[in-house]
Image (cartoon, helix red, strand yellow):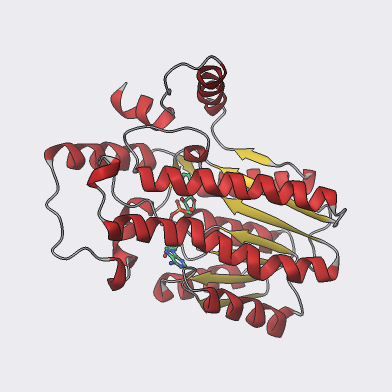
Amino acid sequence: MKELAGKTAVVTGAGSGIGRAMAKRWAEAGMNVVMADIDEVALDDAVIEVSQVGPAAGLAVDVTAASEVEDLLAFTVDHFGRAHLVCNNAGVAGPSGQAPHELTVEDWQWVLDVDLWGVIHGVRTFVPHLLAHGDGHIVNTASQSGLTSGAVISAAYYAAKHAVVAISECQFHDFSQRDSGISVSVLCPGPVATNIMHDEAHRPERFQTVPTPVATEHSESVTSAMSDVIASGRPAHEVAEIVHNAVINDEFYIYTDPNIVESITARHRAIEQRGFPTTGRMDADITG
Ligand SMILES: NC(=O)c1ccc[n+]([C@@H]2O[C@H](COP(=O)([O-])OP(=O)(O)OC[C@H]3O[C@@H](n4cnc5c(N)ncnc54)[C@H](O)[C@@H]3O)[C@@H](O)[C@H]2O)c1
């Protein structure tokens, strides 16, 4: 999508971090911006910030609910007529340093409902709208964890993010085959300095495990090391700039950490040679 000015962007998870930075970048590009988040306080603050740049409107949305994502489309149409650029970005990290079998049912459900189903609801709701208009661009936020695996971040997160990459690839094929005028990109960031390690603050009650499992020494030390890696990650505004350029240039895979290519190559080599799975950057950063 070469021309952004005067068009409308929709961003989920826009109250904080990457989503908030993308919303601001779209406003700077002259777009109307619709911002959605489950955290109303953060959202209101972000809408005030973005409104200083250009037209912006916010709606409290829990992306795990299909009906709320449908409300987001209706809200967008009411405010700005239609959507052109849709960023399915809301996400949570979930617990770190726990083995796949140690995650509770609620851990799995929370991470998959937000990180995977949130994207699915965005795709199901907004793509028919873009197809009806014959143009548009979707950016699905996955992670470099959608291209690698490891033992530091939870298996639920890896599973959700791999699925988001796969869905985005399937969308690419579909859009190409139907000559739709719609593009799709998948954002696979490395560490970005955001609030993602404080995600428990907006974990809805239905996803709480009762009683709260006791953290082990291992999970606490991994979580603390991960928090340090995230805190020293790229600033979110740089990521927003990378996404902006990728949308303008119609690029599919969007990376923020050039070193990720090494991990991807190693993983693919292991698959081709039927070797053992390799780990991604986060494990290398934390366990050396
Ligand atoms: N920060 C990183 O290092 C990093 C790396 C790779 C991928 N990502 C991905 O980037 C995306 C944005 O994360 P971030 O790092 O900016 O984190 P963040 O916590 O700063 O922002 C995420 C936003 O999503 C919102 N959110 C959470 N659950 C929601 C729900 N059910 N419905 C609507 N909104 C909800 C939060 O309130 C928050 O404002 C996520 O998908 C995350 O997985 C982040």
Picture quadrant where residue 42 is located: bottom left
Above or below, 233 against 117 in this view is: above
Q: Residue at x 25, y 66 (%)?
A: 208
Q: Quadrant of the N terminus?
A: bottom right
Question: In the image, is 164 to the left or to the right of 228?
Answer: right
On the image, which quarter does residue 99 sit in? Answer: top left
Residue 266 visible somewhere in the drawing: yes
Quarter holding the C terminus? Answer: top left
Residue 234 horizontal side relative to residue 35, left or right:
left
Query: What is the total number of numbered labels drawn onto the structure image?
Result: 0
- Looking at the rendering, the quadrant in which ligand 1 lies is bottom left
- Residue, x 16% and y 66% (percent of image)? 210
Picture coordinates of residue 152, whole percent (x, y): 32, 36
- For the point 66% across and 39% down, which residue is it? 253
Image vertical order of residue 288 relative to residue 83, above or below: above
Residue at (13% x, 64% y) in the render: 211
Residue toward you, 275 or 1: 275
Farthest bottom residue in view: 78
Q: Is residue 280 above or below residue 7?
A: above
Residue 129: percent from the left, percent from the top? Answer: 75, 71
Point out residue 91 in the picture as x, y percentages from the top left corner.
45, 57
Q: Position of residue 225 (x, y in %)?
A: 27, 36
Displayed quadrant of residue 57: bottom right
- Which residue reaches farthest front? 274
- Vertical arrangement, residue 280 with respect to residue 107, above or below: above
Looking at the picture, tell me which residue is in the foreground, 176 or 55.
Answer: 176
Asked whether 98 or 227 is in front, the reply is 98
Whether residue 142 is visible here, answered yes or no, is: no
Judge left or right: residue 80 versus residue 15. Answer: right
